[in-house]
Image (cartoon, rainbow, N blue to C red):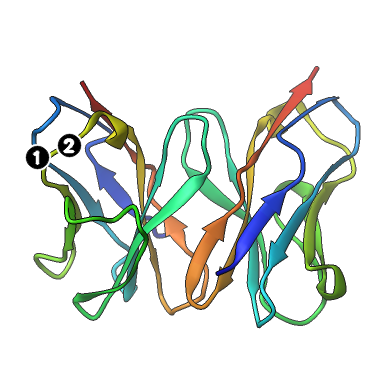
Amino acid sequence: AQSVSQHNHHVILSEAASLELGCNYSYGGTVNLFWYVQYPGQHLQLLLKYFSGDPLVKGIKGFEAEFIKSKFSFNLRKPSVQWSDTAEYFCAVNADYKLSFGAGTTVTVRA
Amino acid sequence: EPEVTQTPSHQVTQMGQEVILRCVPISNHLYFYWYRQILGQKVEFLVSFYNNEISEKSEIFDDQFSVERPDGSNFTLKIRSTKLEDSAMYFCASSARQGEKLFFGSGTQLSVL
């Protein structure tokens, strides 16, 4: 069975700082990779996804993620965060037609 | 953009009672899912449903749980006899094809007292 690991439980940073959230998965076959965001009091929304092709994918709100197959990683980045990026971020891996989520990373951006 | 809708947004029930959580997936989607998120924990897969039958379920999805697509639009999750530990946010999701992007509903917060 696949598993998804997110390295950071809680990240606190200031506005305009750069953000990188780690995600690693364990599965040897073909995967589809996702980052979801959950703003306070709201439901899960898709930030970006990787299915195939260019391993650097760009999503909404200035986020991007890089798929490194050799490292089984799909890290999320944003060069300059805003206060409104405060949210819970979930990495998810779809393998064997089941979506598995990481434990999530709480990101708090201080003004 | 089309969306998945869930009702109610918040359900309060007594331990041992039956609850039905309702979802209306996106109309042309064929794959349906339930996930749950206990407060402070990760999002957990419960069950997937396709062609009027369960295609996969997790160990959480025991005999107390059942899913149904009673008509062409609704997708329901029933918990037969709720326990305190069933308190969670329950998310419905649907996708057009297997393995593709899931569209999530806004969730139903279930509180078991």
| Residue at horizontal 30 percent and vertical 50 percent from the top | B5
Give how far across and how far down residue B2 sits, in percent. 40, 60
Give how far across and how far down residue A78 sits, in percent. 84, 45
Q: Is residue B20 left or right of residue B104?
A: left
How crowded pointer 1 is (Cα within 10 Å; few <14, some 14-19, many 20+) is rated as some
Q: Secondary structure at mark 1?
A: loop
> In which image quadrant can residue B59 be found?
bottom left
Q: Is residue A37 left or right of residue B13?
A: right
Q: Is residue B39 above or below residue B71?
A: above
Q: Quadrant of the C terminus of chain A?
A: top right
Q: Secondary structure at mark 2?
A: loop
Residue that mark 2 sits on: B82
Looking at the image, is mark 2 or mark 1 earlier in the sequence? 1
| Residue at horizontal 51 percent and vertical 74 percent from the top | B100
Q: Are marks 2 and 1 on the same chain?
A: yes
Q: Chain of mark 1?
A: B
Q: Is residue B57 left or right of residue B72?
A: right
Residue that mark 1 sits on: B18
Look at label 1 and name its amino acid.
Answer: Glu
